[in-house]
Image (cartoon, rainbow, N blue to C red):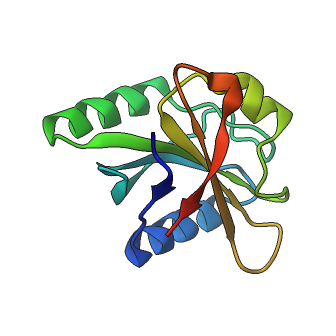
């Protein structure tokens, strides 16, 4: 179980810039790496193009997952933004969380400085998710 994600500044910056460029729409994608250490962010098209919801492009998902597998990287997290909302899991986020043993990261742009938070959803008890640290 992941208790924390180690995210280098360059990845924080890449995510923030990518998601800011998509405002007012939600951005989404994957954080890839190994053993809880993120090495890269792979953005995925939000096919809803909505400011309050996201749905990852199936083609982008498949491409990213196959590429990660080829490069022996793990999907450590699904990440998305809340353009005007808090960095809290929404009711929609909770009801649509279908991937387990990974983290869900939310980046809020409600304030001037982006706010990041993350939660881990274990496969053996997905209703017992817990917040994890981002370092």
Q: Is residue 14 left or right of residue 48?
A: left
Front one among 24 and 33? 33
On the image, the x and y values in percent for residue 53 come to: 75, 38
Front one among 22 and 11? 11
Asked where in the image residue 67 lies, by quadrant, the reply is top left
Q: Is residue 6 left or right of residue 100?
A: left
53 up-or-down from 40: above or below = above
Q: Where does the N terminus fall, quadrant-wise?
A: top left
Q: Is residue 106 left or right of residue 41?
A: right
Asked where in the image residue 108 lies, by quadrant, the reply is bottom right
On the image, the x and y values in percent for residue 2 come to: 46, 46
Q: Residue at x 80, y 31 (%)?
A: 92
Q: Residue at x 39, y 72 (%)?
A: 8
Front one among 120 and 44? 120
Q: Residue at x 83, y 58 (%)?
A: 86
125 up-or-down from 88: above or below = above
On the image, the x and y values in percent for residue 44 come to: 48, 42
88 up-or-down from 108: above or below = above
């Amino acid at each position: 179980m992941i208790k924390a994600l180690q995210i280098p500044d360059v990845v924080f910056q890449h995510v923030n810039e990518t998601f800011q460029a998509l405002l007012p729409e939600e951005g989404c994608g994957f954080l890839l790496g190994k053993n809880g250490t993120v090495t890269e962010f792979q953005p995925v098209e939000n096919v809803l193009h909505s400011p309050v919801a996201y749905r990852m492009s199936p083609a982008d998902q498949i491409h990213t997952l196959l590429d990660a597998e080829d490069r022996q990287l793990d999907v450590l997290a699904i990440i998305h933004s809340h353009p005007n909302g808090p960095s809290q899991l929404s009711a929609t986020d909770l009801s649509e969380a279908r991937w387990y043993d990974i983290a869900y990261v939310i980046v809020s742009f409600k304030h001037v400085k982006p706010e990041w938070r993350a939660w881990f959803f274990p496969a053996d008890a997905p209703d017992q998710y817990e917040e994890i640290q981002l370092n």
